[in-house]
Amino acid sequence: MFSISMNLINNKMKVLQLKINVLLLTIVMLSGLILFGCSDRNNNKTIEEQIPNMNLSPEVLDQTVWKGEVIDYYEGKESSRYQVNLFFRAGNRVSCYIIKGKDDEQMYDSEFKANGKLLYLDVNYIAGDWLLTDATKDKIVLKNDPINGKRISVMTLTRIYKANNKLPPELLDQSIWKGSFVSYVNGKVEFIHQISLFFRSGEVVFLIDRGGEFQSRGTRPYVVDKGMLSISWTWTSPQLSGDWLAFEVSKDKLILQKGYGNKNENYIMTLTRTD
């Protein structure tokens, strides 16, 4: 009898321990789901939600273009003013156009760092840490050296492009597109060429007809990232090389622009799918 009673007690203890283990496992799983849910909600915040909360990051800035001006002050008085255009890319890269006058435009490509309220730029004239002091949906104000008693710079930027249009890699793979390739200088059309593009796995075959004068033909690697098409450098047609931002994307039409933010030169490709 004593042996039977001990067995019953042992069995009850095992059942109780099993229930406790299941309860603990359930608590752990629920905690994980709650944490994951909070993290997911934070990651799904839009640019509009993050910037007003003073939360700059490479992910927020990636594939956005900003245009504005920098005003330098000395002892409270304006000492200089110039235009800046910033094009942020993946990999913490930024292209910067600094326009100080009609014939004084400089272009730089370098790295940037963004964390919370701080934006660090390693670019001539605007190098250093910029503190985000004001932000709205598409406008930010940053200050450089804000505690300097004599010199301070204020940069005001308006966002003029963000990657709204997703460019699916599968849309381009094994497809043929034809259309126009237009070059603009200072807002005026410099030339219009006809272009044909044949995308295949990881590379694009291009044919540019320069108005009957001659044709440019070649094959170059390409990469698609979010709303941007990047074509590797080619001596055959350097205007085609570089990063193209998608302004319109559908199953049979593409409008891409390169040099966005550059005052002097930019290019627009309008393509229709023909395969």
Image: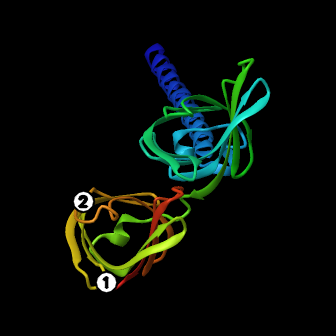
Q: Earlier in the sequence, mark 1 or mark 2?
A: 1
Q: Amino acid at mark 2?
A: Thr
Q: Quadrant for the C terminus, please.
A: bottom left
Which residue ends up furthest to the left in the rendered image? 218
Residue 41 horizontal side relative to residue 199, left or right:
right
Residue 71 pos. (x, y %): 69, 38
**Residue located beneath label 1 in the image:** 211
**Residue located beneath label 2 in the image:** 234
Label number found at residue 58: none
Is 224 located above or below residue 123 in the figure? below
Number of marks: 2
Residue 170 pos. (x, y %): 35, 68
Which tag is nearer the camera, tag 1 or tag 2?
Answer: 1
Residue 265 pos. (x, y %): 47, 61
Give the crowd class for mark 2: few <14, some 14-19, many >=20 residues within 10 Å.
some
Which residue ends up furthest to the front in the rendered image? 103
Which residue is drawn at the image coordinates 55% and 46% (left, top)? 61
Q: Secondary structure at mark 2?
A: loop
Which residue ends up furthest to the right in the rendered image? 76
Q: Amino acid at mark 1?
A: Gly
Image quarter for residue 237? bottom left
Which residue is drawn at the image coordinates 23% and 73% (left, top)? 216
Give the crowd class for mark 1: few <14, some 14-19, many >=20 residues within 10 Å.
few
Q: Secondary structure at mark 1?
A: loop
Is 5 located above or below residue 67 in the figure? above
Q: 185 and 20: which one is in front?
A: 185
Residue 54 horizontal side relative to residue 246, left or right:
right
Alpha carbons under labels 1 and 2: distance apart: 20 Å
Residue 211 pos. (x, y %): 31, 83
Q: 219 and 85: which one is in front?
A: 85
Q: 128 and 222: which one is in front?
A: 128
Is 189 located above or below residue 122 in the figure? below
